Image: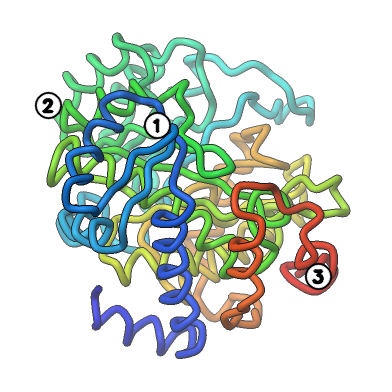
């Protein structure tokens, strides 16, 4: 742990909130040791089996259980933030919308093209406040997407590579420019490896490509309805991926992309990314990762607006200012996305970049810093691998937690 960062985080967030983060980390370690992660991918299973003899891992009945001692050892092997190619407090054009928002017709649902990706990449390249980019919108051909991004932007970038062709292209590109990451959502609830991507994940790690490990538990659905509850669930999923990567390729670069999210009953339990509490939740995730000295990218500056309204720009300003006030490593989604990250607006991208050029930490709205809620961990112990919609913590607190 980085003791200097603990002091910094305590001064920014408050001692009780940092104690909550440290306890959430311990809760995650308990989950990995006692609940385990479902996995049938042969290379990952074999990597953990090597530690069964000394009792630091158990592979049993399709689940992998990892002791606190082994997790700590493997996390410490990962390269730290100061060794990473993106500096602290960096905003990235990131995420992957399936559609482009038609700014002329003022409606979503337009299928993106390679020209749209090139436009996004060129905007990233010329903007001083944009430190790098993710895909923004998704093309069907991963190799085409990688090529268009690389041709138009020299800054750090991340993209998906799930096919042999895409992994080979990523490897070629990485040999020329080291500032790229390959993104995987390795797990899905409840604590289960997504086997659709597990083989590609292993191939990327074996090829020594920096790997961006995403996880998105939803408080009230797939995680407890409390700050520390959803943080610990998110953290446990990403820690599993970090451990697997370090066993397969010791010392490889891993990025903690845990993306804790909140179910909103007013939206049929879909996430509201415009909540200030959503922004705060992701800032807290970033601070825990900085304390552990893990390169880290979270979500912020998003909105629940369908169109690029004044409210959408206010949400961007709030998210950007909160991030600047409290500090972070990398933030994705702060510019262009609309409701539920479905549409990507070029107009909103450019306007939100203008906001980022002038926004200040003192522009941040007031937020209430959370403290540890024991009920979050109790819910995990009681629910274990079940969902949380009917968990008493969820049903009793829908109008009390996260709702600002």
For the residue pair 312 and 203, the one nearer the viewer reads as 203
Residue occupying the point 22% across, 14% down:
168
Q: Quadrant of the N terminus?
A: bottom left
Answer few, some or many: residues within 10 Å of disc 3's Cα (few below 14, many 20 plus, some between 14 and 19): some
Q: Quadrant of residue 381?
A: bottom right
Rounded to the nearest angstrom, the CA distance separating label 1 from label 2 is 20 Å
- Residue 215, compared with residue 358, is above or below; it is above
State which tag comes first along the sequence, 2 or 3: 2
| Element class at badge 3 | helix
Residue occupying the point 56% across, 55% down:
260
Q: Which mark is residue 397?
A: 3
Q: Position of residue 2 (x, y in %)?
A: 24, 75
Q: Position of residue 146 (x, y in %)?
A: 34, 20
Q: Which label lies toward us, 3 or 1?
A: 3
Answer few, some or many: residues within 10 Å of disc 2's Cα (few below 14, many 20 plus, some between 14 and 19): few
Q: Is residue 185 visible?
A: no
Residue occupying the point 65% across, 77% down:
365
Q: Quadrant of the C terminus?
A: bottom right
Q: Which mark is residue 122?
A: 1
Rounded to the nearest angstrom, the CA distance separating label 3 from label 1 is 45 Å
For the residue pair 383 and 122, the one nearer the viewer reads as 383
Q: Which mark is residue 176?
A: 2
State which tag comes first along the sequence, 3 or 1: 1
């Amino acid at each position: 742990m980085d003791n200097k960062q603990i002091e910094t985080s305590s001064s920014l967030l408050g001692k009780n909130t940092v104690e909550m983060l440290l306890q959430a980390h311990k809760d995650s370690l308990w989950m990995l040791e006692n609940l385990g992660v479902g996995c049938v991918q042969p290379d990952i299973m074999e990597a953990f089996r090597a530690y069964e003899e000394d009792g630091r891992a158990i592979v049993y009945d399709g689940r992998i259980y990892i002791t606190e001692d082994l997790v700590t050892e493997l996390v410490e092997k990962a390269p730290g933030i100061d060794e990473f190619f993106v500096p602290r407090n960096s905003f990235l054009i990131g995420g992957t919308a399936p559609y482009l928002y038609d700014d002329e017709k003022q409606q979503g649902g337009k299928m993106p093209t390679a020209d749209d990706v090139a436009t996004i990449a060129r905007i990233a390249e010329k903007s001083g406040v944009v430190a790098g980019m993710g895909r923004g919108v998704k093309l069907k051909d991963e190799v085409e997407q990688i090529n268009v991004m690389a041709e138009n932007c020299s800054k750090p970038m991340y993209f998906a590579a799930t096919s042999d062709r895409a992994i080979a292209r990523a490897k070629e590109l990485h040999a020329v420019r080291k500032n790229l990451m390959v993104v995987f959502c390795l797990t899905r609830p409840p604590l289960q490896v997504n086997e659709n991507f597990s083989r590609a994940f292993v191939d990327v790690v074996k090829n020594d490509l920096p790997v961006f490990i995403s996880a998105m538990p939803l408080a009230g659905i797939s995680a407890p309805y409390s700050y520390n509850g959803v943080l610990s669930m998110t953290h446990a999923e990403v820690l599993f991926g970090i451990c697997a990567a370090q066993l397969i390729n010791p010392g490889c670069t891993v990025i903690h992309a845990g993306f804790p999210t909140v179910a909103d009953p007013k939206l049929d339990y879909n996430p509201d990314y415009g909540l200030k509490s959503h922004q705060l939740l992701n800032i807290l995730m970033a601070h825990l990762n900085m304390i552990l000295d893990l390169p880290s990218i979270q979500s912020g500056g998003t909105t629940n607006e369908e169109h690029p309204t004044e409210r959408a720009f206010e949400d961007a300003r709030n998210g950007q200012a909160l991030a600047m006030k409290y500090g972070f490593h990398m933030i994705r989604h702060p510019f262009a996305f609309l409701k539920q990250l479905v549409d990507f607006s070029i107009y909103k991208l450019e306007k939100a970049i203008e906001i980022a050029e002038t926004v200040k930490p003192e522009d941040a709205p007031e937020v209430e810093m959370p403290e540890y809620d024991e009920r979050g961990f109790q819910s995990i112990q009681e629910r274990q691998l079940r969902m949380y919609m009917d968990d008493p913590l969820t049903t009793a607190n829908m109008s009390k937690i996260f709702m600002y």
